[in-house]
Amino acid sequence: MTSSTIRRPKRQELREIAAKRRRNTNLMLIGGAAAIVAMIAFVVFLNIRATLPIGEEISLPTLGNAHIPQGSTSPITYNSTPPTSGPHYPGLAPWAIIPEPIRYEQIVHNMEDGGVIVYYQCLEGCPELVEDLRSVVAPYINSGRHVLMMPNDPTWGSESGFAYHKDMESRIALSAWQRLDKFDAFDADRIRAFIERYEGIDHHGG
């Protein structure tokens, strides 16, 4: 085929080809921008969701993290039951499922160290609830996570009548540093969500 027989595209065809290329380029740019916007929106959604309360969780002001002598009583009244911050003993309670109550002054230190406490209160006994809670808590403890489960007993106190615990007015309470969620019906997802959000966060800064 000689050069004289080669058909050259007409000016209109060249304009159409250029317009098609521009459309394709614009579509690629729009698609890329939409993907970036979607990614930003997803990150914003995750950040907002991370700040939303779990269940009926409340946030409490800090009462500080002063150490007091082992066995003494907090010099101030805690601002919640169970407490979520404040004066506490220098030692830690074990990360375990503990069948007997422990002084709040001890447990507050566990929360300062990034712990989550799972309380239950049922003075008449609630073996089914205890087993349900155990089924959620035990895997965390067995894997080395900072979780402790124990009863809250408002009848427990000294011989002089001083109460070591107070009525938490619910069957279940989840506490972490400055965070508290209380409810009556067992909810495994709610407990796991609270643990996953707050376990392991150190609060030695107060």
Image: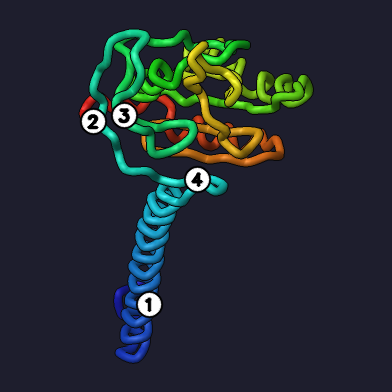
Left/right of residue 197 with respect to residue 187 in the rendered view: left
Secondary structure category for the residue under label 1: helix
Front disc: 1 or 2: 2
Q: How far apart are marks 4 and 3 (CA)?
A: 19 Å
Q: Position of residue 115 (x, y in %)?
A: 42, 22
- Mark sitting earlier along the chain (3/1): 1
Front disc: 1 or 4: 4
Secondary structure category for the residue under label 4: loop
Could you tell me if the residues under marks 3 and 1 are in contact, i.e. CB atoms within 8 Å? no
Name the disc covering residue 23, or none.
Answer: 1
Q: Distance between the residues labelled 3 and 1?
A: 64 Å
Q: Residue type at mark 3?
A: Gly
The front one of 68 and 57 is 68
Q: Which residue is depicted at the point 37% across and 77% down?
A: 23
- Mark sitting earlier along the chain (3/2): 3
Q: Residue type at mark 4?
A: Glu
Q: Which residue is depicted at the point 62% across and 33% down?
A: 172
Residue to which mark 3 is pinned: 86
The front one of 162 and 51 is 162
State which quadrant residue 29 falls in.
bottom left
Residue 140 in view in this figure = no
Q: Position of residue 125 (x, y in %)?
A: 75, 21
Q: Which residue is depicted at the point 73% across and 26% down?
A: 129
Residue to which mark 4 is pinned: 57
Q: Where is residue 164 in the image (x, y as percent from the top left)?
A: 48, 20
Which image quadrant: the N terminus? bottom left
Q: Residue type at mark 2?
A: Gly
Height in image: 173 above or below 88?
below
State which quadrant residue 90 falls in.
top left
- Mark sitting earlier along the chain (4/2): 4
The front one of 28 and 192 is 192
